[in-house]
Image (cartoon, rainbow, N blue to C red):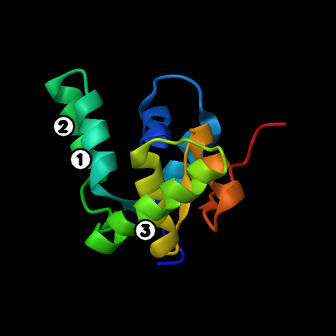
Amino acid sequence: MENLVLVDTSAWICFFARKGFIEIKEAVSTLLDNNSVAIAGPIIVELIQGARTEKEKEIIKSKIKGLHWLKITDEHWRKTAELSFSLRRKGVTISAIDSLLSTIAIEYNCSILHNDSDFDIIAKHTSLRLFPLNKPT
């Protein structure tokens, strides 16, 4: 699954935004075209929860249908707890969901596409790989 990219909720929000975030929109579009997008349960929950209308919810569901599903196991939860503990000892406090998604990305050998500084911090202390964006110069 090395070529898969776990697209975090923060990146999906940018992708669905009407304006801005061109580099994220282009990256997600290309990854979708290449069948390289991975998703996990917590991301789906956050996306559907954030939908403002039934129509928006259906658009989200249609975009995520058929993506590579990364299953979460009991071992992932244990490793997430250890990661969170380790980061906390270093003075880094992150959300449980971001910790879980980082663990999943590491375990499935995926990079992560995001717009959330927590993942930048996690990557500094772990083997988490961040998807490189073509930032405008």
Where's residue 34, x and y in %?
Answer: 48, 66
Q: CA distance from mark 2 to mark 1?
A: 6 Å
Image side of residue 130 versus residue 45, left or right: right
Q: Which residue is mark 2?
A: 58
Give the Cα separation between the discs numbered 3 and 2: 33 Å
Q: Position of residue 134 (x, y in %)?
A: 73, 48
Marking on residue 79? 3
**Identity of the residue drawn at 52% across and 75% down:** 109
Nearest to the eye among marks 3 and 1: give it. Answer: 3
Is 58 or 45 nearer to us in this picture?
A: 45
Q: Which residue is mark 1?
A: 62
- Picture layout, residue 37 above or below residue 45: below
| Residue 28 visible, this orientation | yes
- Mark pair 3, 1: CA separation: 31 Å
Q: Amino acid at mark 2?
A: Glu
Q: Amino acid at mark 3?
A: Lys
Does the CB distance between marks 2 and 1 fall below 8 Å?
yes
